[in-house]
Image (cartoon, rainbow, N blue to C red):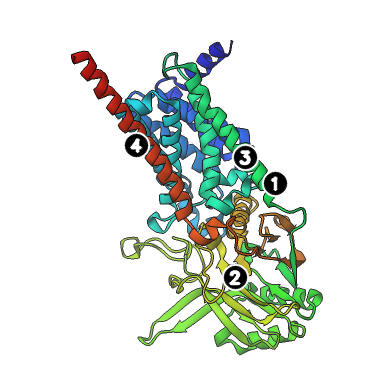
């Protein structure tokens, strides 16, 4: 009965022509349901298993490329359609770009999955040891998938949005594995069982024996159980906290007002009023990205008004525009984070260094003179110097000096690139963002999920202030202790969670991408050894026959 069901599903997934392309698109759309805010894990596993099944039966390498591309295109269209919402904020200027944004970006990203299909098919056809082994086929697919995800995180400035490991963001025990191998380790924990399930869906005789098909699935299931027990053991019932009080503002200002200079004064007064009403002495207060509409360093009145709103010994971290007059006479504009003392003095500033293409600057501008950046202003933003670990300039009530790593907007999506340890390992990650560009879509939910995993990877709590949501306090285990809802005006008050001390359980904190790379290297060595052993056995058999 199981064999009959298997063959029926296989025939359904391996139809030829437009039917198979359509089926891959449906499966790519199902993968999106595995991510925030849905977290339908079985959809993610089944969709990738279906892709593996189709690739196992692909006739040529270009057939495999097409299967991967249609799968990836549908996935990225359904996962990233919210990008079009940012183009409707000033629809008269940017609405014409919507068809391009919802098709060209997914089409480009789909190429990564298409390359996985191409390489997977090529390797299986070239090496019988891989083709005849469900074990080796599972390993090579996982190696290719996670390896391509790593490339996607860096190539063309990188766009590691919705790596498949994020489907585990709301699974507390499993997500603890990110402390060892980061988001790439979580991707492995999804791809291995999904690919193993795909090996079960086959035509008769594809693998040498039925037991070969079961082994990868059993081993992957065992690995998931081990990681579950590890996560349950690692995570305490109650996370430790410091004594530092934190106040986070979410003013919920419409994005159309933020980009309209006529609303600048009321926009600024909203933040000042909420701060006066809710701040207490000694608070660490967070305002979201772009919350100060005037350049503070050139506008002394900004500091005076902030000083009037801050209670004694409080500190404010807020997003705003920084303008620098260069020696050559040019003006440089930065999307910045400012750190104010209770008397309004600017203690330090951080300039965003990972800018959004077409949002904050236009790449290859001289070849694309007809395209404007989406954010306000005709001139591109300049790139900051890089990651920093900044002091709060006063100890918390326990006498411990605190440091923070500033992150603006989508800088929080880059695994292994959210902190520096000089001059000290930060006690918190502070992420100021304005997800009002996304509207009430699943974009802000996906953005929050990535912030959760950054906290687990580094073992450092993350404080997040967003203009329209979702603002949150995330502890070092990825648990959201306080959060707003999307599209509401809200105030969060919380106590800063404690950062985890150094330990062997924080491999990713110390080694970054090298930790998952070591695992992929082990996979590659196992595959190469299998190929070598298979060829050696083949030569020995041939020699015996000739003898």
Whole-number angstrom distance, CA of label 2 to CA of label 1: 26 Å
Q: Which mark is residue 226?
A: 3
Q: Position of residue 429 (x, y in %)?
A: 61, 66
Residue at figure coordinates x 38%, y 41% from the top left: 524
Q: Position of residue 39 (x, y in %)?
A: 64, 41
Whole-number angstrom distance, CA of label 2 to CA of label 3: 31 Å
For the residue pair 140 and 109, the one nearer the viewer reads as: 140
- Structural crowding at the residue carrying mark 3, measured as other residues with C-alpha within 10 Å and reported as few (<14), some (14–19) or many (≥20): few
Q: Name the secondary structure under disc 2.
A: loop
Which residue in the protein does label 2 denote? 426
- Structural crowding at the residue carrying mark 2, measured as other residues with C-alpha within 10 Å and reported as few (<14), some (14–19) or many (≥20): many
Residue 413 appearing in the image: no
Q: Name the secondary structure under disc 1.
A: helix
Camera-near label (2 vs 1) is: 1
Q: Which mark is residue 232?
A: 1
N-terminal-most mark, 2 or 1: 1
Q: Are marks 4 and 3 in contact (CB under 8 Å)?
A: no
Residue at figure coordinates x 72%, y 73% from the top left: 270
């Amino acid at each position: 009965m199981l064999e009959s069901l298997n063959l029926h599903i296989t025939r359904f997934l391996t139809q030829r022509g437009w039917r198979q392309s359509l089926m891959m698109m449906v499966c790519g759309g199902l993968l999106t349901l595995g991510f925030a805010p849905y977290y339908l894990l079985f959809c993610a596993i089944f969709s990738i298993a279906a892709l593996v099944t189709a690739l196992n039966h692909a006739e040529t390498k270009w057939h495999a490329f097409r299967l991967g591309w249609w799968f990836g295109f549908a996935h990225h269209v359904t996962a990233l359609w919210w990008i079009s919402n940012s183009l409707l904020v000033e629809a008269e200027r940017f609405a014409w770009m919507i068809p391009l944004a919802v098709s060209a970006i997914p089409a480009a990203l789909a190429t990564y999955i298409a390359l996985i299909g191409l390489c997977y098919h090529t390797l299986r056809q070239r090496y019988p040891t891989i083709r005849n082994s469900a074990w080796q086929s599972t390993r090579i697919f996982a190696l290719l998938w996670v390896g391509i995800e790593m490339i996607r995180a860096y190539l063309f400035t990188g766009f590691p949005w919705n790596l498949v490991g994020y489907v585990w963001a709301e699974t507390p025990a499993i997500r603890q594995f990110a402390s060892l191998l980061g988001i790439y380790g979580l991707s492995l924990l999804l791809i291995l069982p999904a690919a193993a399930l795909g090996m079960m869906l086959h035509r008769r005789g594809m693998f040498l024996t039925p037991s070969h098909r079961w082994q990868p699935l059993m081993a992957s299931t065992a690995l998931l159980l081990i990681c579950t027990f590890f996560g349950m053991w690692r995570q305490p019932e109650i996370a430790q906290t410091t004594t530092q009080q934190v106040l986070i503002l979410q003013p919920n200002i419409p994005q159309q007002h933020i980009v309209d200079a006529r609303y600048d004064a009321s926009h600024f007064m909203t933040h000042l009023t909420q701060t006066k009403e809710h701040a207490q002495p000694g608070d660490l207060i967070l305002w979201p990205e772009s919350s100060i509409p005037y350049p503070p360093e050139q506008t002394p009145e900004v500091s005076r008004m902030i000083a009037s709103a801050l209670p004694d010994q409080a500190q404010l971290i807020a997003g705003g525009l920084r303008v620098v007059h260069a020696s050559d006479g040019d003006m440089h504009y930065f999307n910045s984070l400012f750190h104010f003392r209770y008397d309004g003095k600017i203690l330090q500033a951080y300039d965003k260094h990972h800018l959004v293409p077409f949002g904050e600057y236009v790449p290859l501008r001289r070849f694309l003179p007809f395209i404007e950046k989406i954010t306000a202003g005709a001139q591109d933003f300049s790139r900051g110097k890089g990651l920093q670990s900044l002091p709060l300039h006063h100890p918390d009530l326990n006498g411990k000096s605190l440091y923070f790593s500033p992150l603006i907007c989508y800088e929080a999506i880059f695994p292994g690139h959210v902190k520096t340890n000089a001059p000290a390992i930060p006690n918190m990650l502070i992420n100021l963002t304005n997800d009002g560009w996304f509207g009430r879509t699943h974009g802000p939910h996906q953005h929050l999920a990535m912030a959760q995993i950054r906290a687990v990877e580094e073992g450092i709590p993350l404080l997040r202030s967003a203009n329209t949501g979702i603002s949150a306090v995330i502890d070092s285990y990825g648990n959201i202790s306080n959060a707003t809802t999307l599209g509401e005006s809200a105030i969060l008050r919380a106590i800063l969670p404690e950062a985890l001390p150094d330990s062997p359980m924080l491999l990713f904190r110390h080694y970054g991408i090298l930790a998952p790379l070591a695992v992929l290297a082990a996979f590659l060595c196992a595959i190469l050894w299998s190929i070598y052993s298979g060829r050696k056995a083949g030569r020995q058999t041939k020699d015996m026959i000739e003898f």
